[in-house]
Image (cartoon, coloured by chain):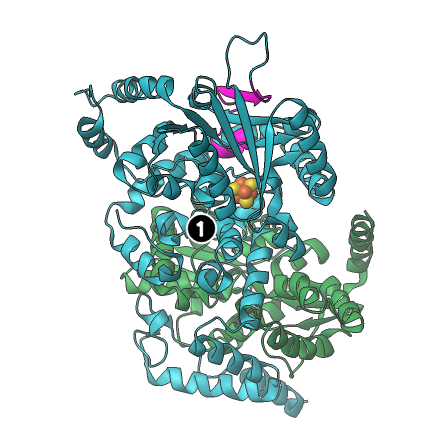
């Protein structure tokens, strides 16, 4: 009960906050996959947040959310990583993450590993409260609507598991994408079914993961869309990698933020967007 | 059929994936189950309420387990049943076999019960002088085929109609030569009817144990539980202690959840509450009724912080919706309980050391929790078993090393960023036209898919440069 009350409080205060969001400091947690594999998602995130009126900062001392350790059962390793993240980000008004699974890690799982450390538990809970997944933050907190973006073609959408089930990200990206001129939505059969990535799962159980992603791309190809969009780099890398291995160049996998920031036309593997 | 072992999980998986028609065979069942469940839930607006209620009933009973067990025993005794307690599977099978031997039973009929499989009752009978006859149609099929079950609701889902035709022709005394389903069912019915009537002892499981009446409950579609229980002189029930609920009123929300989640039906053909042996003015029924209450790791789960798993009503929805189960099938798990619920139960029934590979074979995507009718947080439980397994160092050393090395880097952001920057340089060496087809140390990825080529520098490198340019410019 108390949880429900505090949630409502938070939403209400968010509604008030968004009136003067420019006074709020937003920390961008880039995530290690975006940092290493696809910086353009990070730059797209900054662009969108600034368009939405946020005052964005990127703390230099950041690394990974700790999922590889947490999901492997290494609680101590997770704590070691989480200490850093908490220290770097707890003083922002909001922390925004361009990934459903990394945002869910911070929002839902940090508290799991600090059960026996009251002081850190409170700090982890505070960080959880101020952390948001990028696409839902833009819509729910900033009331953001993209303007002046055009992209000819059709897209299909993969809802990544953590974003969809843990954070209930579903409407927000679709709502923003509907404002992109020229872009049509071809719904994906099994839109919220796991793509087989699962972090370390995809290399530890490579053969099972392969079967899952093979089926996923069958569904993706059946939509005949030009773009496969999502909000998680891990899933996108997995599906894009399988599409390319199977020779399907007709569909391009992009992060939703890249499309909304107008980067889609110039993006292709290996090129810098900045 | 050779029976898979849980410790051979990797091998079992390779074997399953190499079986060309397995996926089609699994999907035939799980796709239909998924669809029918979705329809049933859509037509059941109070689903979320029932789910909360079901969870509450289970949690309450588990919390006051001692009290309700004592109440159940008292009332079952008052009904004239004999109550036995078994702390392990071996103890339980021994109790059942001893009763059969005391009555010099030659043939026993059995209606489907996962607990029977769990405690090894089927094997115990097969290694004894007593003939075991499975009366559930699917169990009948896998008994003829010599297979273990591959699903907790549809144990013979891995067998095709052609397989069944062959098996029935070989084993039925008066087999049908038609391949129509109704004729096949008739053939099984003919075969089983005489066996029902000549059985010495009927053995059943129980979906619910009602504390306030001492009743046991069976939920079936074929009526075979009733025919297993009524004609023979002796009825033996084996049931896990987590089947307990305070009363019939408490069983009702769980029943509504069970049938919809399992098969998408609003109700099954038969739901029967059995109340001890035949009374003086009853027309029929067993003369003796034994109830064997089995712990087999359940109180340990309670003590281990796994009490949420004891809510499980064995509906099978979690496996029908599991992407891993849907590709590898039930046999690959090498255990009685497959899929997500199995990944939590097997480590307690066998051991975590033996079954930790199953707990890792999960993407933690949360679909199972989403459909579980009693809100069991399966991903959380699976993750916590991994944490236990990590503490006990059950994982292969290389896996541990990689995760530990990663954590050691990630806790030092500067070093981590340097590592990422070097990683980009390394990956660039293997990139061709936007893609990496092969690279040392990443075969788990590149065996089946390509890796996108990274940009020239990491985000942090580019960002720093941009910021510097900006401040220089100012
Ligand atoms: S864990 Fe939940 S979904 Fe799975 S069998 Fe048990 S009750 Fe059904």
Classed neighbour count for the residue bearing mark 1: other residues with Cα under 10 Å, few (<14), some (14–19), many (≥20): many
Which chain letter goes with mark 1? A
Residue A58 percent location from the top left of the image: 66, 78
* The image quarter in which residue B81 lies: top right
Q: Residue B243, relative to residue B231: is it above or below? A: below
**Residue placed most toward the observer, B455 or B195:** B195
Q: Residue B48, relative to residue B424: is it above or below? A: above
Chain with colour green in the figure:
A
Residue B246 percent location from the top left of the image: 70, 31
Horizontal arrangement in the rendering, residue A65 relative to residue B101 (left or right): right
Q: Is mark 1 within 8 Å of ligand 1?
A: no
* The image quarter in which residue B27 lies: top left
Residue B414 percent location from the top left of the image: 60, 88
* Residue numbers of the magenta segment: B258-277
Residue hosting label 1: A156
| Disc 1, SS | strand
Based on the picture, tell me whether residue B262 belongs to the magenta stretch: yes
**Residue placed most toward the observer, A74 or A46:** A74
Residue at horizontal 69 percent and vertical 78 percent from the top: A83
Q: Colour of chain B?
A: cyan
Q: Residue A233, relative to residue B231: is it above or below? A: below
* The image quarter in which residue A70 lies: bottom right
Based on the picture, tell me whether residue A229 belongs to the magenta stretch: no
Residue at horizontal 22 percent and vertical 32 percent from the top: B167
**Residue placed most toward the observer, B214 or B257:** B214
Residue at horizontal 47 percent and vertical 63 percent from the top: B356
Whether residue B246 is visible here, answered yes or no, is no
């Amino acid at each position: 009960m108390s949880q429900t009350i505090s949630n409502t409080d938070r939403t209400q205060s968010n509604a008030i906050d968004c009136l003067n969001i420019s006074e709020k400091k937003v920390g961008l947690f880039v995530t290690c996959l975006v940092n290493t594999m696809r910086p353009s998602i990070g730059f797209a995130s900054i662009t969108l947040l600034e368009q939405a009126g946020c005052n964005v900062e990127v703390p230099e001392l950041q690394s990974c959310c700790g999922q590889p350790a947490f999901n492997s059962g290494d609680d101590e390793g997770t704590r070691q990583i989480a200490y850093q993240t908490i220290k770097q980000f707890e003083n922002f008004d909001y922390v925004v993450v361009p990934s459903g699974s990394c945002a869910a890690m911070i929002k839902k799982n940090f508290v799991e590993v600090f059960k026996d450390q009251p002081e850190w538990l409170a700090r982890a809970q505070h960080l959880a409260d101020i952390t948001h997944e990028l696409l839902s933050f833009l819509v729910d907190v900033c009331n953001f609507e993209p303007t002046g973006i055009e992209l000819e073609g059709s897209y299909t959408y993969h809802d990544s598991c953590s974003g969809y089930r843990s954070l209930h990200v579903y409407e927000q990206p679709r709502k923003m994408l509907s404002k992109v001129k020229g872009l049509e939505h071809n719904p994906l059969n099994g839109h919220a079914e796991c793509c087989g990535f699962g972090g370390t799962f995809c290399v530890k159980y490579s053969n099972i993961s392969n079967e899952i992603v093979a089926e996923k791309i069958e569904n993706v190809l059946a939509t005949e869309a030009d773009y496969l969009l999502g909000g998680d780099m891990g899933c996108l890398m997995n599906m894009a990698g399988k599409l390319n291995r199977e020779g399907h160049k007709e569909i391009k996998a992009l992060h939703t933020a890249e499309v909304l920031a107008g980067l889609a036309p110039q993006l292709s593997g290996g090129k810098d967007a900045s | 059929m050779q029976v898979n072992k849980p410790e051979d999980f990797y091998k079992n998986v390779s074997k399953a994936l190499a079986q060309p028609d397995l996926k089609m065979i699994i999907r035939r069942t799980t796709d239909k189950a998924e669809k029918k469940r979705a329809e049933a839930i859509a037509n059941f607006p109070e689903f979320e309420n029932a789910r909360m209620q079901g969870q509450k009933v289970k949690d309450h009973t588990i919390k006051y387990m001692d009290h309700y067990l004592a109440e159940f025993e008292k009332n079952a005794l008052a009904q004239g049943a004999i109550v036995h307690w078994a702390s392990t599977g071996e103890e339980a099978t021994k109790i059942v076999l001893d009763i059969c031997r005391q009555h010099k039973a030659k043939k026993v009929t059995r209606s489907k019960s996962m607990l029977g499989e769990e405690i090894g009752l089927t094997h115990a009978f097969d290694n004894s002088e007593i003939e075991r006859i499975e009366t559930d149609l699917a169990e009948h099929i896998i008994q003829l085929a010599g297979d273990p079950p591959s699903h907790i609701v549809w144990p013979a889902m891995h067998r095709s109609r052609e397989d069944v035709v062959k098996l029935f022709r070989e084993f039925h005394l008066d087999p049908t030569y038609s391949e129509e389903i109704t004729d096949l069912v008739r053939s099984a019915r003919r075969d089983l009817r005489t066996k029902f009537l000549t059985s010495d002892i009927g053995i059943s499981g129980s979906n619910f144990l009602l504390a306030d009446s001492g009743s046991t409950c069976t939920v079936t579609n074929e009526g075979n539980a009733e025919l297993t229980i009524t004609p023979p002189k002796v009825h033996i029930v084996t049931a896990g202690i987590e089947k307990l609920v305070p009363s019939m009123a408490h069983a009702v929300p769980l029943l509504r959840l069970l049938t919809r989640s399992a098969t998408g039906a609003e109700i099954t053909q038969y739901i029967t509450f059995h109340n001890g042996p035949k009374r003086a003015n009853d027309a029929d029924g067993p003369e003796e009724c034994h109830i064997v209450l089995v712990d087999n790791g359940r109180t340990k789960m309670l003590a281990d912080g796994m009490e949420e798993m004891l809510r499980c009503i064995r509906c099978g929805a979690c496996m029908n919706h599991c992407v891993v189960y849907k590709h590898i099938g039930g046999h690959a798990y090498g255990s009685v309980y497959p899929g997500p619920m199995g990944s939590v139960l097997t480590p307690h029934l066998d051991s975590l050391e033996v079954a930790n590979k199953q707990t890792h074979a999960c993407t933690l995507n949360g679909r199972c929790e989403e459909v579980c009718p009693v809100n069991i947080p399966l991903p959380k439980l699976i993750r916590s078993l991994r944490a236990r397994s990590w503490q006990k160092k059950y994982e292969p050393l290389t896996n541990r090393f990689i995760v530990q090395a990663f954590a050691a880097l990630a806790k030092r952001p500067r070093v981590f960023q340097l590592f990422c920057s070097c990683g980009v340089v390394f990956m660039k060496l293997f990139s061709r036209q936007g893609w990496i087809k092969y690279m040392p140390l990443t075969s788990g990825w590149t065996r089946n898919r390509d890796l996108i080529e990274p940009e020239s520098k990491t985000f942090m490198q580019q960002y720093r440069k941009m910021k510097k340019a900006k401040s220089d410019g100012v």
